[in-house]
Image (tube, helix red, strand yellow):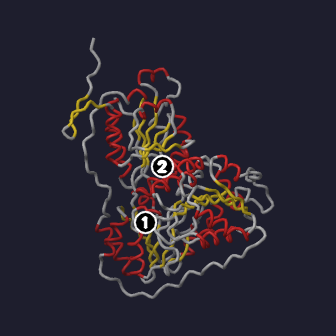
Amino acid sequence: MTGPAPLAVVETAAQTTTATVRDAVVDLMRRFGMTSVFANPGSTELPMFRDFPGDFRYVLGLQEASVVGMADGYAQVTRNAAFVNLHSAAGVGNAMGNIFTAHKNRTPMVITAGQQARSILPFDPFLSSAQATELPKPYVKWSIEPARAQDVPLAIARAYYVAMMPPRGPVLVSVPVDDWDQPAGFVPVRVVSTELRPQPAVLAQIGDALDASDRPAIVVGAAVDRDNAWSEVVALAEAHNARVWAAPMSGRCSFPEDHRLFAGFLPAMRERIVELLGGHDLILAIGAPAFAYHVEGAGPHIPAGATLCQLTEDPDTAAWAPVGISAVGSIRLGVLDLLARPAPKVRLLPPTRVAAQRADPSPLISVAYALQTLAEVKRPEDIVVEEAPSARPVMQAYLPITRTETFYTMDSGGLGYGMPAAVGIALGKPGSRVICLIGDGSSMYSIQALWSAAQRKLPITFVILNNRRYAALQDFAPVFGFSPTDVVQGTELPDIDFVSLAKGMGCAATRVSDAGDLRDVLERALSCGAPNVVEIQVA
């Protein structure tokens, strides 16, 4: 009969220590800069947090989807993987909507999920996850339940490297509850690169096509801002006098929307994209799919006579592009290589974008007037987190984003991201003012994020556009054969008192129904330095 396994003896910094799985993982998290833990606690995770380090912070979310949303926002603004802890199967299930969004947002995230003790897993115990590695698929890049407790630190190290590899994304490690006190060795320090340069020969073909074109257009997607390539893309557009369009459904702003070359926003409709890009002989999609569609379409994907080129960090996106040349690699490095080519020929400036007509106040506040007023009172450096799908076209006309890293929304289309993401962004960029612009329907998916904002005293103004309905669905219904008089079931949302909900979670709140009061209310809210809710009753 053998005795208990001896404790690992590990030498670090000339000091001999006995190490457990918990010790090794904490050391790893500290070295990776993952000292903020976004979590909602469960019984199978408690041992991880015994003797919680004083230099770490535990960011509590009141529901697992909010936890992942907060981590998503935090990871995006810090450009580092966020650390998430979820409860076994039920917690991961609750979080799946925002795990899907993190996957679409290309957000690096190391998710640990609790699991029951190894010794009772054969008996299908309460709160176990029967197929822990399969549950989050296909929306994680990698998932594992290590074969031994001693393998947990190495699994988390690998998870971090995988999450940070392009295209970035979430990963999951399932950890049995009794693993944390088992002996383990510290993980060696390593250097692993996180950028890949596009293949020079393919990028040269794109450069040649761009130089030869007479009327180029650039379509920018979220990866431009994610990859810190904003200034380089502006320089490329200016060098070629190319019109710049925002890609359909882009989760970030990747070009200043007040720039002379900015042309507007492409819709997720094939025929309309072809129409708007008509007249261009070359289309260069940078950091974007070519193209994201939302409704069934027909016909060509690009205008007749045009060439499509693409620079993307995602090989899957390159693989399904229907036509053209695709280079895969870092957006920033790829654009720098294009800028290093000899100066292109001189082209005439393209026509300017037509500005939206100014919105006027009315007895029922219009969304256009609400967003126009918000644009006038906010500062250019304020960060906008948006989840108001029916208001997005109006926002694109009346609330221009002009600086890098000041706009975030979900690439997925799934609701429940905006409010917790605003919390994570405020945590990741202390001192910044954050505006969460959200619809009344969207807000109810993760309303508990208000509590986290209040507990942390974060400078977030939650602007709720309350039209008392799921307006995006009602607006979309005619695509599927609804007539203007047909009732769209389940889309009316009367009698939600957002002021009471906000106050109940510790946030100050104001309701605005008079256009004459709107500017003053927004100015006070944005300058108060504390979390607050402004409910705007809109037409």
- First of labels 1, 2 by sequence position: 2
Which amino acid does the dot numbered 2 rest on?
A: Ala
Q: Which label lies toward us, 1 or 2?
A: 2
Q: Where is residue 225 in the image (x, y as percent from the top left)?
A: 44, 65
Q: For the residue labelled by badge 1, is the local secondary structure a helix, a strand or a loop? A: helix
Q: Which of 65 and 515 is in front in this view?
A: 515
Name the side, left or right, on which 530 lies relative to 290.
right
Q: Quarter-wise, where is residue 534 in the image?
A: bottom right
Asked if residue 184 is positioned above or below residue 224 in the image, the reply reads: above
On residue 502, the disc is none
Q: Where is residue 105 in the image (x, y as percent from the top left)?
A: 48, 55
Asked if residue 112 is positioned above or below residue 436 in the image, the reply reads: above
Query: Quarter holding the N terminus?
Result: top left
On residue 71, the disc is 2
Name the side, left or right, on which 80 lies relative to 498.
left
Q: Where is residue 211 in the image (x, y as percent from the top left)?
A: 36, 80
For the point 49% across and 62% down, the residue is 432
Q: Residues within 10 Å of mark 2 (few under 14, many from 20)?
A: many
Q: Please name the residue that numbered disc 1 is placed on.
A: 224
Which amino acid does the dot numbered 1 rest on?
A: Val
Q: How far apart are marks 1 and 2 (CA)?
A: 21 Å
Q: Do the residues labelled 1 and 2 touch (CB within 8 Å)?
A: no
